[in-house]
Amino acid sequence: MTHVKRCPECNSINITYDEEHGEVICNDCGLIIEEKMVDTGADMGGKFDKSEKKGRAGAPISMQKFDKGLTTNVGEISDIYKLDTKQTRKFLRLKKWQERVSTSIERNLRLAMAELRRITSYLNLPQVVGDEAARIYNYVLQRGFVRGRSMESVIAACIYAACRSYKIPRTLDEIAQASDMERKEIGRTYRFIIRRLTIKVKPSSPNDYISRFSSILHLSPKTQNHALRILKKADDEELTSGRGPAGIAAAALYVAALLNDEKKTQREVADVAGITEVTIRNRYKELIEKLGLEEKMKLTEIDKKGKGNK
């Protein structure tokens, strides 16, 4: 556990590391080479029951908990009821008082963080997104921007902002479905938070949605790459500006799937992207006409008919 090989006093290599005192000692001359060393290993000492985990470190700090996981709670309800009647009443009373003496901000955070964990779990979002959403919500709450708005809409807006910050492709419709809030309300709250906190969020790119949509639709890597090339051409022709990124990405995947003979209906693609079939058809027509893909589509249809006749 030490890099010391020789004693600087007597040049001896007979050296001992004393874990209990955190010292490195020369056994020949008695020189304390190092002292007050910090043991960075896991704390595995002490006596434990077989049912207990061999460690005393506790849970890590988490932004997704109202107290960051640092507060010691009186006890879980299931554990309290294992005690006798007198002790059970005592601890239930203590637990009730612990909740009463908490501030309004703490009570708000307790509910908000529970809602945040529920939505991020439902959407299968990575922990870093949940932590960022919790950080934004704490910032908003401390500055009083939550007043006049429902806690659920603010949490949903913070999650959407965190997704945008980390380029995690999630649409407002998906956030609305997970939070059971109206899409317009979430969008309005999101714009308010971005404006008040001056958060710089880059606009979503259609490319961000290709990988996720193609995975859900079980499309081949060839089709996925073809869709990315279509989007590159569409961007060069300025067909992506002013259009929803999810819609243009879905249309590009639909075109690529047809060109690569992978049968996917407009309804299937629209459901995955959270848009209507009308949007798919409109974007599809724009891509076909503006990028000159009519001939390729016709050849694909002729090839399909030829295979059918055979």
Image (tube, rainbow, N blue to C red):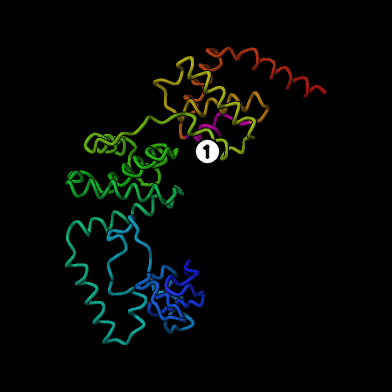
Mark 1 surroundings: few (<14), some (14-19) or many (≥20) residues within 10 A: some
User: Image check: 153 left or right of 6?
Assistant: left
Q: Position of residue 84 (x, y in %)?
A: 32, 87
Q: Position of residue 257 (x, y in %)?
A: 62, 28
Instruction: Decide: is 147 above or below 69.
Output: above
The kind of secondary structure the magenta stretch mainly shows is helix
| Residue drawn 40% across the image and 70% down it | 39
Relative to the observer, which residue lies in front, 178 or 94?
94
Quickly name the residue at label 1. Answer: 212
Relative to the observer, which residue lies in front, 49 or 302?
49
Relative to the observer, which residue lies in front, 259 or 53?
53
Residue placed farthest to the right in the image? 310
Q: Position of residue 251 (x, y in %)?
A: 53, 25
Quadrant assignment, res 214: top right
User: Image check: 156 left or right of 192?
Assistant: right
Point out the stretch of residues depicted in magenta: 264-273
- What amino acid type is highlighted by mark number 1? Arg
| Residue drawn 52% across the image and 38% down it | 212
Relative to the observer, which residue lies in front, 62 or 104?
62
